[in-house]
Image (spheres, coloured by chain):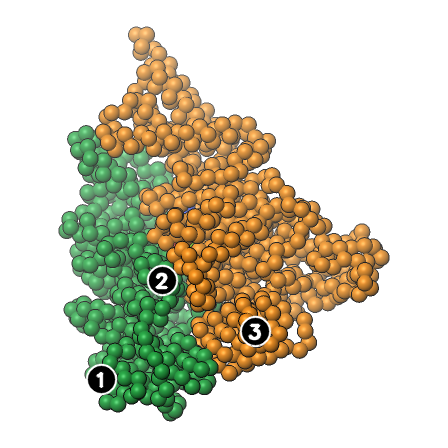
């Protein structure tokens, strides 16, 4: 650590300070700024030139007296100390304890920035994770190493769903549980407490590392927090061979913090004031998950993204969707009908489902059942729409069947109790129950063999 | 290559943009930055100072560190050993890098694209004699690069003269001499199995030709409805999750190209792994050989440095042109050109250039046009005709097609496969929207289809599109006043359109049988759907109620035919079509009898 301190801060503007005559300062260096009262702020070099360096001050530059500060270049990146002891602990975005206990002592220290995984070192994720939630397991299956966000909105039960998944997630025929890395950015005290209690009550706390930055903590710390959390996840996965599930909430606050900093730096905005590099920045975070050749552990990621004004085209969910391997979308409409979890399957998607389901992984009929349910539901929603315009009485016999299917599907397949852990078999059987309300000939996505084995018509009528 | 690299000093580091002092450096020149030797490219000059865009992260670099000019522009190595490989955005071999630096990509690595130690079996051309005049494109000999790709060793562009000698058949590594050519000035040029070419300069050819035959992709909505020609340029725009990557991967798998170059430009790592893991197991439906033997990947994933993303498209194109010059039909897929454009935006923003639309620089459209202009079918210098087909995915923010990248691309390309969120949400795949998509190649493609498949192709295609348009109109009516308002004939039109959608347009990439559909099968399915519609309509005209037709089990089977019969079983589809015809005829006779009674 360098001991040299500079008193040459020359100007301050928009979250940045400039310091003159600091030869040889490295781009990206960490900076500590101390004022006359002895208070410190952290920062980072975001431009390094001969004559002058620009420093982004994480805590902001309010009340900073340039005449009266010492700037120290730490000559090291943001690092975190790692050991198995991190499990059961709670840290802030810089990896400092938040739980009143002493810092983790370890000679394993890793920079939180990470570097890009070589695509040639990855293996394709294909192990089915049973979450016990029908809309996910049956229609948008999650696999080990996938990044699958929950798109939500204010007041929707994304936290409860995330907690349910954390409680229930397991490999189909395996008992090994996941280690959980929980990253909270800009959330309320109540939300953080909800998760803390959840983990404690379900007895998994010994297997959880929490990284927390609350709504009233410095926003800039949100920028390092997911990186710190993922560095811990990588340690658990690749040093300790664990399967790690990373829950990150809420990526929207992360992106807003990024916008704040970008605006301060004067970066050219792309959409809604977010900088053009928001995509790459988010990708640096999301792409840290996956499966790597010859490594036993894995990192699976479930970020929560709240959609501002429920708008899925808003830059944050939009860019997230362009990076992640699908999304689980919650709907206010279903929520208003009292359906939990209010998963709207139409815009939901799992791109990695195809290699994780079927004969050897779940059940041979699974791929076609999913395709058929989607086709029926799409048509059923059209019919519901039509019925709302012209009235259900005007519908044909066939259309009324679809209408009933839509209702049954929402009430029986989508809805389930928060404590209900449905096996994939139960989910698929339920699907067949619902599909059997249609005559066989209409189920064109299913093969004759599957129909012969599972179709059980008439008795349901 | 200069024997002495010039060195200078780093002055200013602003993310990927680094200013250096380096007298005599040229615009476009490659430089190495800092102690760790990051690779970069000079993008502008002012006096002694040069502005460099680096292809790697600049964390830790300090003013005062050295900078070194390498003397050549960003170039790629062209020679045997490219096929089956995976390279980063500046053509570093990622599998080798994994051996060197492990699971994560280290910075400052210097690994050549082509394997120096591998021996290749070189077979000289029989008709070559010392003393003979040779020039760019003269085939000096061949190397069997993979089981399907015969690599023609050509005299590189710029070299013209008298052949002094050519190496005899035998094993050579890529650096061994395989020929000497003496130019008009008397200088002798040593040629080996590979050469370098600057990626930003299109490779020369003899002359441009028009496209003549369609690129068969095995995807019905593409081949039958919105065909692409070999040598054409196309775009696949669509919101996230609509199916752009699947369309591109399907083309990489099943198209009748000789060479496929897949550029993953700012997209997901797992998508490249999917190709890397699945292609070596899949067989090309034409040659029966493993697909990986004709495929090459360029990977700059979304988490890799942004500036290299800009380069990756040119790196891919240059390799595509190189194989084109051997007389091959090459398809290059770029997923996604929006991420490429964002890299331009990123650099231009750092340089403080004036943004015009959504932060993009004014030169976005001309750069895009120049990229697509490198596609085309050409008469090569010495190997007959070859082509580069370029298909770019476009990822519009919020799925809004009026944004700059989509709208400029639309003006440039000839084939536009617009993906729709509504179709994707309803799991109608490929979600190519038949209303907003277009192809400027229908008439040219028709000549091929009429010759090779069926003379009624263009007419049938038009009928199907008309029926789909009618369906859209009728659906609007239904949504206003309900289905009861429709006549039986109109309802049958809805049934007919539904049959086209499900039985022809929808095609699951995940269905083992239907993932590829030969042109014969494509036409058989289209013809089946339309003849069911035509025959049914004739019955309705004589008074048969639509309900009697709509519930016929044959209709369900017609929707399933695509997955029941593979491309070798077109005869079965035709037989089934006859069965349907008989069933209709039965109804007709029945009905005629009733009305007499
Ligand atoms: N032809 C198809 N057959 C079957 N499934 C498909 C097809 N096309 C798309 N899909 C489904 O849609 C998913 C998303 O497709 P894809 O990854 O190609 O989207 P994209 O447009 O490339 O999205 P992004 O812009 O986020 O990369 C696939 O994982 C697959 O489940
Ligand atoms: Mg894609």
The location of residue B16, given as percent across then percent down, is 46, 70
The location of residue B377, given as percent across then percent down, is 61, 45
**Helix, strand or loop at disc 3?**
loop
Can you tell which chain is drawn green?
A
Per the image, the residue denoted by label 1 is: A101
Query: What separation in Å lies between label 2 and label 1 (alpha carbons)?
Result: 42 Å
Residue nearer the viewer, A309 or A375:
A309
Per the image, the residue denoted by label 2 is: A269
Find residue A130 and report its image quarter. bottom left
Q: Is residue B338 visible?
A: yes
Residue nearer the viewer, B345 or B513:
B345
Can you tell which chain is drawn orange?
B
Is ligand 1 closer than 8 angstroms to the Cβ of mark 3? no
Residue that protrudes farthest toward the bottom in the picture: A3
Same-chain check, marks 1 and 3 = no
Residue nearer the viewer, B56 or B428:
B56
- Name the residue rendered at 43%, 49% in the picture: B406
Q: Are marks 2 and 1 in contact (CB under 8 Å)?
A: no
Eyeballing the image, is B370 above or below A220?
Answer: above
Eyeballing the image, is A342 above or below B521?
Answer: below
Find residue B423 and report its image quarter. top left
Q: Chain of mark 2?
A: A
Nearer the observer, disc 1 or disc 3? 3
Q: Chain of mark 1?
A: A
Query: What separation in Å lies between label 3 and label 2 (alpha carbons)?
Result: 31 Å
- Name the residue rendered at 32%, 7% in the picture: B596
Report the quarter where the C terminus of chain B lies: top left
Eyeballing the image, is B364 above or below B109?
Answer: above
Q: Is residue A254 visible?
A: no
Q: With B591 as the anchor, is A422 left or right in this view?
A: left
Q: With B517 as the anchor, is B113 left or right in this view?
A: right
């Amino acid at each position: 650590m360098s001991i040299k301190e500079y008193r040459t801060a020359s100007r301050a503007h928009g979250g940045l300070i400039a310091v003159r005559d600091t030869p040889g300062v490295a781009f990206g260096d960490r900076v500590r700024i101390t004022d006359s009262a002895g208070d410190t702020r952290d920062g980072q070099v975001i431009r390094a030139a001969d004559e002058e360096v620009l420093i982004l001050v994480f805590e902001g530059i309010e009340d900073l007296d340039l005449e009266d500060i010492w700037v120290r270049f730490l000559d090291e990146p943001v690092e975190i100390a790692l050991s198995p002891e991190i499990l059961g602990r709670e840290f802030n975005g810089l990896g400092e304890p938040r739980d009143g206990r002493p810092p983790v002592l370890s000679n394993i220290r890793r920079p939180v920035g990470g570097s890009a995984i070589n695509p040639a070192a990855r293996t394709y994720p294909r192990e089915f994770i049973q979450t016990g939630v029908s809309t996910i397991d049956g229609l948008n299956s999650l696999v080990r190493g996938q990044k699958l966000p929950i798109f939500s909105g204010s007041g929707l039960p994304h936290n409860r769903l995330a907690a349910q998944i954390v409680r229930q997630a397991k490999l189909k025929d395996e008992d090994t549980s996941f280690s959980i890395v929980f990253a909270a950015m800009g959330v309320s005290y109540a939300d953080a407490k909800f998760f803390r209690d959840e983990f404690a009550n379900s007895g998994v706390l010994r297997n959880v590392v929490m990284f927390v930055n609350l709504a009233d903590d410095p926003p800039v710390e949100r920028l390092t927090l997911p990186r710190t959390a993922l560095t811990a996840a990588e340690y658990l996965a690749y040093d300790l061979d664990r399967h790690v599930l990373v829950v990150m909430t809420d990526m929207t606050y992360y992106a807003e913090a990024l916008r704040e900093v970008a605006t301060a730096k004067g970066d050219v905005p792309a959409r809604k004031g977010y900088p053009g590099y928001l995509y790459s920045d988010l990708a640096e975070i999301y792409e840290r998950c996956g499966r790597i050749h010859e490594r036993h552990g894995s990192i699976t990621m479930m970020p929560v993204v709240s959609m501002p004004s429920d708008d899925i085209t808003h830059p944050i969910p939009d860019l997230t969707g362009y990076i992640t391997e699908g999304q689980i979308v919650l709907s206010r409409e279903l929520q208003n009908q009292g359906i939990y979890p209010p998963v709207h399957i139409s815009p939901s998607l799992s791109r990695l489902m195809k290699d994780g389901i079927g004969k050897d992984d779940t059940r041979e009929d699974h791929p076609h059942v999913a395709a058929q349910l989607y086709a029926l539901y799409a048509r059923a929603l059209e019919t519901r729409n039509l019925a709302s315009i012209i009235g259900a009485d005007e519908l044909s016999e066939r259309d009324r069947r679809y209408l009933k299917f839509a209702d049954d599907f929402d009430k029986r397949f989508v809805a389930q109790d928060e404590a209900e852990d449905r096996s994939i078999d139960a989910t698929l059987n339920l699907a067949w129950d619902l599909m059997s309300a249609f005559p066989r000939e209409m189920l064109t996505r299913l093969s004759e063999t599957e129909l012969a084995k599972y179709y059980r018509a008439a008795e349901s009528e | 290559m200069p024997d002495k690299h010039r060195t200078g000093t780093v002055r200013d580091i602003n993310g990927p943009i680094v200013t250096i002092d380096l007298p005599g450096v040229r615009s476009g020149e490659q430089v190495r930055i800092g102690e760790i030797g990051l690779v970069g490219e000079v993008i502008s000059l002012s006096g002694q100072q040069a502005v460099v865009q680096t292809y790697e992260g600049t964390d830790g670099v300090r003013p005062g560190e050295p900078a070194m000019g390498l003397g050549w522009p960003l170039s790629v190595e062209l020679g045997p050993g490219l096929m089956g490989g995976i390279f980063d955005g500046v053509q570093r071999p990622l599998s080798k890098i994994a051996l060197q630096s492990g699971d994560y990509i280290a910075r400052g690595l210097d690994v050549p694209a082509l394997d120096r130690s591998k021996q290749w079996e070189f077979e000289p051309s029989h008709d070559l004699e010392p003393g003979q005049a040779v020039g760019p494109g003269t085939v000096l000999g061949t190397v069997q690069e993979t089981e399907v790709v015969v690599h023609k060793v050509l005299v590189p562009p710029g070299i013209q003269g008298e052949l002094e000698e050519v190496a005899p058949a035998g094993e050579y590594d890529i650096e061994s001499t395989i020929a000497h050519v003496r130019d008009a000035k008397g200088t002798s040029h040593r040629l080996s199995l590979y050469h370098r070419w600057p990626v930003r300069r299109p490779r020369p050819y003899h002359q441009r030709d028009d496209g003549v035959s369609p690129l068969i992709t095995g995807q019905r909505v593409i081949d039958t409805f919105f065909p692409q020609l070999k040598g054409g340029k196309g775009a696949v725009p669509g919101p996230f999750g609509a199916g752009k990557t699947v369309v591109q991967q399907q083309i990489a798998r099943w198209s009748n190209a000789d060479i496929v170059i897949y550029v993953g430009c700012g997209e997901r790592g797992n998508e490249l792994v999917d190709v890397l893991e699945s292609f070596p197991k899949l067989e090309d439906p034409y040659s029966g050989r493993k697909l990986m033997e004709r495929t090459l990947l360029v990977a700059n994933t979304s988490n890799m440095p942004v500036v290299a993303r800009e380069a990756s498209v040119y790196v891919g194109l240059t390799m595509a042109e190189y194989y084109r010059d051997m007389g091959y039909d090459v398809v290059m897929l770029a997923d996604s050109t929006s991420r490429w454009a964002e890299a331009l935006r990123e650099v231009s923003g750092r340089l403080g250039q004036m943004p015009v639309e959504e932060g993009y620089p004014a030169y976005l459209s001309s750069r895009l046009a120049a990229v697509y202009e490198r596609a085309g079918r050409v008469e090569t210098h010495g190997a007959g005709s070859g082509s580069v087909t370029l298909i770019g995915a476009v990822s519009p923010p919020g799925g809004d097609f009026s944004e700059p990248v989509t709208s400029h691309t639309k003006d440039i390309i000839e084939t536009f496969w617009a993906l729709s969120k509504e179709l994707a949400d309803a799991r109608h795949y490929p979600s190519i929207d038949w209303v907003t998509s277009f192809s400027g190649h229908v008439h040219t493609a028709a000549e091929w289809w009429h010759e090779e498949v069926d003379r009624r192709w263009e007419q049938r295609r038009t009928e199907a599109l008309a029926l789909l348009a009618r369906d859209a109109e009728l659906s609007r009516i239904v949504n206003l006043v309900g289905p009861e308002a429709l006549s039986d004939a109109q309802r049958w039109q809805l049934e007919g359109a539904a049959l086209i959608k499900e039985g022809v347009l929808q095609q699951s990439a995940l269905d083992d049988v239907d993932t590829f559909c030969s042109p014969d099968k494509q036409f058989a399915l289209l013809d089946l759907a339309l003849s069911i519609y035509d025959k049914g309509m004739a019955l309705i005209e004589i008074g048969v109620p639509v309900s009697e037709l709509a519930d016929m089990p044959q209709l369900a089977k017609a929707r399933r035919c695509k997955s029941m019969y593979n491309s070798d079983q077109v005869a079965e589809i035709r037989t089934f079509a006859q069965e349907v015809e008989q069933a209709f005829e039965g109804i007709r006779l029945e009905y005629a009898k009733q009305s007499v009674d």
